[in-house]
Image (tube, coloured by chain):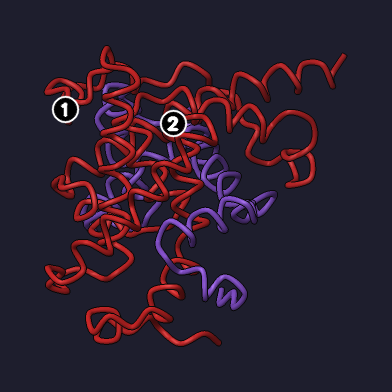
Chain colours: A red, B purple
Amino acid sequence: MQNEISLDALIAGDRAEFARLVDTYSSSIYRLGLRMLGNPQDAEDVLQNTFISALTHLQNFEGRSSVSTWLYRIAANEALMLIRKRKPEVDLAPDEDAESEENADGLKPRQIVDWSALPENELLAGEGKKILDGAINTLPETLRIVFLLRDVEGLSIKETADALNLTETNVKTRLLRARMFLREQLSGYYRERMIEEQK
Amino acid sequence: MNEHVHKNCEELLGSLSAYIDGDLKPELCLELEKHLAGCDDCRVVLNTTKRTIDLVHSPVEKPDLPEDVRERLFKRLNLDNYLASKSE
């Protein structure tokens, strides 16, 4: 089992330890960049800028969060900055209405079809996973980054909130919206499949 | 379906995600479970949301970093000496 990254060694300028940090997190950060920006070149920019920034700011890292949360925070900022540059029309400011828990518009389920009992191989056969990936890519950026950190990379609600400088309540609200949106998209797909199978 | 009030569905929907994460206060959990017991639609929404998250986690593909991307990254960071010792 691999030893944990030593913060002391990193701060002391241990290059081998920094290389280990890069190898430990580069796949996840590259994936995050790919999902947020949608192309390999921009994902590579996010990846490189993240570790250059980490190297530059390592001395200021106070250890209030884990090294991984700190890295995801840098990566998320890099990704959002690049999105602002590439697509200035995208609104990355929090939508007050959407953040409100009372405002349930857009949350109301439209597809009520129970595909949950389909076996795993059936769910993954055909286009299911592709539909899901496509749906993730169409989530608004402010929801997508929350979903990717929490549900794809497996950060906790608190770590996601720390990485994105959001409150835990905001993270939960955005996560709910993202999950409900994806559920709708998948339900539409599996509904068609179930109808076809019955024919 | 006794005394089922559909108005509750929308109110309780906001708790669904936290419920799935095991992150809901016990009293809200009870309220939600009581509602779920009598509401087919909400049970479908709960089960399909759970399955959606399962699918996200299914290990179909978690591609590694392409080797050329890793190489350029290491060079950019002046870590050329450590390229051979992949430590992941």
Q: Quadrant of the N terminus of chain A?
A: bottom right
Q: Earlier in the sequence, mark 2 or mark 1?
A: 2
Percent position of residue B74, x then y: 48, 62
Residue under label 1, please give it.
A94
Relative to A28, B7 lies left or right: left
Please give the label number shown on residue A37.
2
Please give the label number shown on residue A170.
none
Percent position of residue B48, x then y: 54, 36
Percent position of residue A79, x then y: 33, 38
Is residue B61 shown above or below A45? below
Residue under the point 59% across and 27% down: A186
Is residue B13 shown above or below A6? above
Which class describes the residues within 10 Å of circle 2: few (<14), some (14-19), or many (20+)? Answer: many
C-alpha distance separating marks 2 and 1: 19 Å
Nearest-to-viewer mark from 2 and 1: 2
Q: Amino acid at mark 1?
A: Pro
The foreground one among A60 and A139 is A60
Label 2: chain? A
Is residue A191 shown above or below A8? above
Q: Quadrant of the C terminus of chain A?
A: top right
Which class describes the residues within 10 Å of circle 1: few (<14), some (14-19), or many (20+)? Answer: few
Place residue B64 in its image quadrant: bottom right
Residue under the point 25% across and 43% down: A77
Label 1: chain? A
Relative to A136, A61 lies left or right: left
- Discs 2 and 1 carry the same chain letter: yes
Place residue A59 in its image quadrant: bottom left
